[in-house]
Amino acid sequence: MSIDTQIRSSHRILILCMFLYAASLIKYFDRDPLSAQVGPQGPIELAVLVGIVVTLLMAFRRHSWKLVLPPSAKAFLAFGAIALVSSVFSFYPLLSFAKGLSFILVCGIALAVSSVLGPVRVMKYLYYSIVIILAIDLFVKLAGAAPLLEIDDYTGRTRLFLFGFYPTLLGELSAVTLLVGFLLSKRPPLYSQVFLFGMNVAADSRTGSTLLVAILLAIWFASVRLTPRLVSLCCGVASLLAVVMLVWSQTNYRNSADLASMIRPLYGDKVADDVSSLNGRTEVWNAATPVIEHSIFLGYGLGGARDVLVKNTTWGVAGDAHNAVIELILGGGFPAVFVFLFGWAGAAKRAWRSRGSLRIRALGLYAFIAGFGIVAPNLTNLQALSTFLIITIDTMVCTESTSSCTRERAARILRLHKEPLENPAGT
């Protein structure tokens, strides 16, 4: 077998690994938050990740590939190690240990596939894997007898439920994948982006949809040249939409003409209450205060404080803190959080210093992760997909920076070699 054939075969295996990682995002088993039994979900996720890691180790050993280790990955691995130690104090030590191990494995997978395939290919294969999985999921849903949209028992809203994805997770996954599409070297088909946007809207993740639209507009404005004509057109379209919303609210809610009535068709009747309490999340944060106070040095491991959160809230289903930073504190303690955030801040700083469209689009994805992290533990849930993407993007930025410095150094050396030839007499 020739070397090229071996490399192509190895790449196919790595592509399969990316599809398996995307498949591991699916929750194959709905866990009762009040139960300590994990069911088959945990073993399935862990088995898939271990299988991917073993495959990558064999490929690295066979081809002697070098591992690219960006600074952010070092920080995330350090956080994972601290969270793993913290699982000793968990209410469910074995569960927290498995989650901490899964987090470390995900970071390792991101490093390995980015080093071999390159970050752009990694995001390409991950993007299309997620789109295919969601499309199959939607097809199965449409083929079944169940209605496409269902009433959410907890929020009372009509939302899109798919197998293995709670609507909020579905909205987050669709939004993140859509933003990944902007980072590909070849822009994905428009229909796939529209499909992801429709999934995000149908999931009725209000925070996620609003944040996604704001970031898409910011990316667009930063990518185009603003002219008086374009600004006037945008203002005209915005004014027209505002008038349409006002007419809709007056037609359906004649007794009130305030802002709440205008956005009621999109966000329901409890907008004011949901905004003031962030849809009940402030209650969960207050319930997390006692365990935060005991997380000065070490935490409770990933998912280790859920017993307190479940018992101290009226929700009764708050299996997590519904906030990324609080969840990190509970997982590894304050030192671990500082390490994680320091690594992410470094990645954001390097992305800011990058050139071209990469800076705008990478920061756009970072902004969504940070903004959505206010209401969801998105750095650790969904098989740590957000952390996976931060490592991949940071690897891309570091690789581009190294390549740029190499090209500049080569150009300077070439100029130095040309100067004596142009003036051999030194006159």
Image (cartoon, helix red, strand yellow):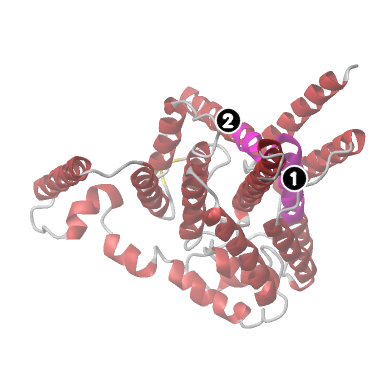
- Number of numbered discs on residues: 2
Residue 197 place in picture, x, y as percent = 41, 37
- Rendered image: mark on residue 268: none
- Is residue 262 found left or right of 298 in the rendered image? left
Q: Quadrant of the N terminus?
A: top right
The answer to the question of whether label 1 and label 2 lie on touching residues, with beta carbons closer than 8 A, is no
Is 110 in the magenta? yes
Q: Helix or strand or loop: what does disc 1 sit on?
A: helix
Numbered range of the magenta stretch: 102-124
Residue 38 place in picture, x, y as percent = 71, 53
What's the amino acid at mark 2? Tyr
Q: Decide: is 351 above or below 232.
A: below
Query: Which residue carries the number 1 mark?
Result: 109
Q: Residue at x 30, y 52 (%)?
A: 267
- Is residue 49 found left or right of 386 in the rendered image? right
Q: Residues within 10 Å of mark 2 (few under 14, many from 20)?
A: some
Q: Helix or strand or loop: what does disc 2 sit on?
A: helix
Residue 401 visible within the image: yes
Residue 70 place in picture, x, y as percent = 71, 54
Residue 297 place in picture, x, y as percent = 72, 80
- Rendered image: mark on residue 128: 2
- Is residue 395 found left or right of 164 in the rendered image? right
Q: Residue at x 50, y 49 (%)?
A: 359
The Cα atoms of the two marked residues, 1 and 2, are separated by 18 Å
The rendered magenta stretch, by its main secondary structure, is classed as helix
